[in-house]
Structure formats: structure tokens, C-alpha cells
Image: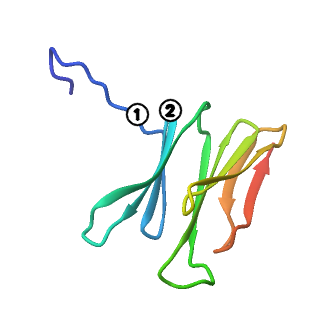
Amino acid sequence: MRRRGRESHRIQVQHVIGSHNFIAVAYPNALSCYKLGEFSEWRSIFSTKLDYHVDLMAFNSRVPVSGPNSKEVLIAVSSGSHIHLWNVSDQSEVANYDLEVHVETLLFIASGWSLSVQVV
């Protein structure tokens, strides 16, 4: 219900996905990642602007060989035939792919970095 006399300037959420104590949220022009803290508060750990809409998202977090106190987090998003990958842990863009066909499904396999893509 909208209140009379007040304009709504809310940002509409397009997608929300999670893995362990992380969630990723896609907005019309941005992607954000949040981590659940020790005191049940969500804190932003990654955010980037997007020049495209998000059709699908896949999200993975895993404990690397270096130790159980650190996690590596990877987010993949698709837009049409394009797939974009980010490593949230070190705030870097990993790769961009153009498959030249529309992506139907996007998911990570097991706890590794294997990404499965179904196209039409």
C-alpha cells in the first residue's frame, strides 16, 4: 500500500540467491553480495554496477586449501548469451564469456569452481 503524498524510490530486487552465510542480490543496474556476521547482521562485502539486466545468477562459496577461516566466493550472472564471473573474496572480475546463444540454466557443480551452463 502506498501512502498518499509520498513517492516510492525503492530499488526493485530482481534475484536473490545464497550459499552458506552469503547472499547475492541482483538489482536492475547493480549486483551486491552480503555476508552474515557474528551478531546476525548482514554486511555488504561486494558491489558492482551493471550495464545490463541479469537473467540468471549462480553463487558458490567454498573453503580453500589455505585454511578453514577463509572462504572463496564466486558469483556468475548471465544476460542473454553473456556470462560474467566475479571473485567476491578478492573483489575481482574473473571472466566474461559470449556464448552467442541464450543461456537457459546457470549453476555451479559441487563445491568446486565448475560452472554448468545449459543453452538453447
Classify 100 as above or below 32: above
Asked if labels 2 and 1 touch by Cβ distance under 8 angstroms, the answer is: yes
The residue under the point 83% across, 43% down is: 99
- Mark 2 lies on a secondary structure that is loop
The answer to whether residue 21 is left or right of residue 3 is right
Classify 16 as above or below 111: above
Residue at the far right in the pictured view: 100
Residue 69 image offset from top left, x and y in percent:
47, 81
In the rendered structure, which amino acid carries the disc numbered 1? Answer: Gln
Residue 46 image offset from top left, x and y in percent:
48, 52
The residue under the point 57% across, 35% down is: 50
Residue 77 image offset from top left, x and y in percent:
63, 47
| Dot 2 crowding, Cα within 10 Å, few <14, some 14–19, many 20+ | some
Depth check: 71 or 23 in front?
71
Quadrant the N terminus occupies? top left
Residue 12: mark: 1
- Mark 1 lies on a secondary structure that is loop
For disc 2, the marked residue is: 28
Q: Rounded to the nearest whole Å, what is the CA distance between mark 1 and mark 2?
A: 7 Å
Residue 112 image offset from top left, x and y in percent:
68, 73
Classify 92 as above or below 69: above
Residue 59: mark: none
Q: Earlier in the sequence, mark 1 or mark 2?
A: 1
Classify 63 as above or below 34: below
| Dot 1 crowding, Cα within 10 Å, few <14, some 14–19, many 20+ | few
In the rendered structure, which amino acid carries the disc numbered 2? Answer: Pro
The answer to whether residue 71 is left or right of residue 116 is left
Depth check: 74 or 16 in front?
74
The residue under the point 38% across, 32% down is: 11
The answer to whether residue 32 is left or right of residue 111 is left
